[in-house]
Amino acid sequence: MKKTFLLLMFLLALLPIGVSADIIINEAMASNGVFLNERHDDWIELYNSGSDKVSLEGWYLSNDPFNLHKWSFPAKASIKKDGYLVIYCTDDDVITGGPSGAIYANFKLSAKGESVYLTDPDGSTTSVTFGAQFGNISSGIPSGGEGWHYLEKSTPGAVNSSAAYDARAKEPVIETAAGFYSGSVIVTMSCAEGQEIRYTTDSSEPDRNSTLYTEPFEIKKTTVIRARAFGSELLGSTTAGSTFFINDAAVDASVPIVSIYTDRDYFFSNKMGILVEGNAKNPNYNRNWEYPVTIEYFDENKTRVIAQTGSVKVNGGSSRQNRQKKSLAIYARSVYGGSDSFDYPFFENRDYDSYSTILLRSTASDFNSCRLRDAVFGEMSDGLGVYYQAGRPIIVFINGEYYGHYNLREKPNKYSLAQWEGITDPDVIKGVDILMGTGMNATDVVQGSSADWVELMNYCRKNKLDTPEKLQYVLDRVDIDSLYNYAIFNIILGNYDIGNTRVYRFPGGKWKFMLHDIESGCMGDKSDPLGSIIRSKSSKTNNYPHYILAALLEQEEYKDLFLRRTAEIVKSNFLYSEQVKPIYEKWSAKLEELLPRHLTKFRSFSSIKDWRVNVKASMYYARIRPRKMIDQICSKLGVQSAAKQEYFGEVFKLLDIYNAEGT
């Protein structure tokens, strides 16, 4: 019996103490800048060094030493022999997007450093501790090495890099100022003592094999210089970048210049480039791929006011199909060593100067026509209290190459909507609901939930608002001013793409409308989109969510309010010579300056003459539509001549003055 006991103790002594030695925490990323299907979560990688597959049922992962059972692995989770498993760490309640079949833990990692604990079914725990992390740099056990270090290359789900470091080189300085030069320019750079500079001139990210900087050098054509510092015992630095415009006509333009650049493959390779079709069945530009990019913004005086690394992806819907140009969304991302905001007052009609995202808009369906309608109509709506995207014309360079006229726009997302509404509480911002189209389908949800909106629409469809209680139910849930102003403005404008509707609601607030992609206005004198906006409750939705307005217009009080609001909006926003024409003329004057060069690269239309004809036609419809639409609205709502005169008599006199031919 004694011998048996001693033998048992000897065998137990041979077993590893703690979690099975075969399963180790091998690598982690606490500040991830790699986007996979619109997500960029932190992650932890486990490695199975054993010769057998290991089931993880009953295992736990945590970042809290007082709650080691914070997150349990899914029942079927396992790691094959010599295999890896990546767990994405997020505190989101609902996971959308991300890698196919990904596993998500219910906690995030701290970029300031922390410990991670792995506990097996027997309660044995192993842990790793990492310090402050660099953006988009992983830490882990180097291949063939031991201990935790910063890794030269992150490799989730694969063998780790053997290049590992405990400190990082300091970003070099490109001492020659970025900007506009004639003839040529001598570029000078410097770095910290004991480090060396490697640089590129093709917009690619420098590595340890890039050109070594030994002395100032000359460039004679427009070039993007990117530079990093390295040391034998140091992780490569963040990247410095500068665009040098040499003998470029852009210097004469009176608009800002935007230079964006990144590794060429991110833009143009058939395998992964977002600006090309690629070889797959689903074109590259239709995917939500997002890559790192640097943006430099030179103001009207050609002074560089923004030089920041963020990320880029193609933006828009049908506009993606434009083979010549794509609209691009540029995101501020601190994971690349910068900030989560672009801090500059890009737009004169905004009283804030910080943006999470900006758009470089190719002008979408207005590409071959006026190239200004969406931005002009947004400015025309100013004062109505309805959110619209601010904008200004710019010139864009991509990887040092001229890419012509774009319109810089504010991106309509939860952050810009919060700024518009004056909301600063992060929890309130996070809780916003944003819907598109009618909002009646699951695919219409941009963010949040449509449940309350669908309930409201169905209530209005099924009920007459003929009691104070029924009416109050609706008034408590939708902002009537926003609903009316949005509907009336679009009717007068003639936005036939009215199905591109967006509504939003912050927690504790009411549903409101935003003006989004309205470039399809002032293209004719037909009644569109009146028939989609004002419809009976018994009619099915025609892309536009009409039930709420239909229910309100059944009540004389709210029909009266709608007609009076129509008169107010015409007086405040559609008096042609005072309110409309100056905005058109401001934008067209800028484009008149930019389009000759633009047309040498992009044949948006055959000539400047054709463009002028298009703009003149749009201005014509902006001038004549208000009177025509008043007539159409009155006809639609059964307003007789005497009542029509009561509502719009003063407006007709003003239109005779300000919207007459020749004004």
Image (cartoon, rainbow, N blue to C red):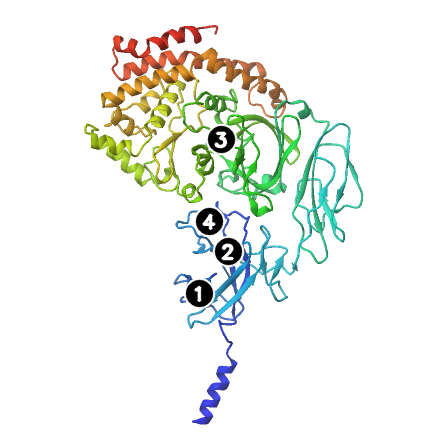
Tell me what residue is drawn at x 51 percent, y 58 percent: 44
Q: Mark 2 sits on what residue?
A: 109
On residue 319, which mark appears? 3
The three-letter code of the residue at mark 2 reads Leu
SS label for mark 3? helix
* Distance CA(mark 3)–CA(mark 4): 24 Å
- Tell me which numbered mark, 3 or 4, is placed earlier along the sequence: 4
Secondary structure of the residue carrying numbered label 4:
loop
At label 1, which amino acid type do we have? Leu
Mark positioned earlier in the residue sequence (3 or 1): 1
Task: Count neighbours of disc 4 (C-alpha within 10 A) and say few if under 14, some if 14 to 19, many if 20 or more.
Answer: some
Between 297 and 501, the one nearer to me in the picture: 297
In the picture of the structure, the residue carrying the numbered disc 1 is 68
Locate residue 524: give its quadrant.
top left
Q: Is residue 428 visible?
A: yes
How busy is the neighbourhood of tag 3: few (under 14 within 10 Å), some, or many (20 plus)? some
| Residue type, label 3 | Ser
Q: Are marks 3 and 4 in contact (CB under 8 Å)?
A: no
Mark 2 element type: loop
The quadrant in which residue 131 appears is bottom right
Locate residue 105, reporting x and y percent.
44, 57
Mark 2–mark 1 distance (CA, rounded to whole Å): 15 Å
For marks 3 and 4, give the one nearer the viewer: 4
The residue mark sitting in front, 4 or 2, is 2
Q: Is residue 197 left or right of residue 47?
A: right
**Quarter of the image containing the N terminus?**
bottom left
As displayed, is residue 334 above or below residue 524? below
| Camera-side residue of 466 and 88 | 466
The kind of secondary structure element at disc 1 is loop
Q: Are marks 4 and 2 in contact (CB under 8 Å)?
A: no
Q: Which residue is mark 4?
A: 98
In percent of width and height, residue 585 lies at 53, 15
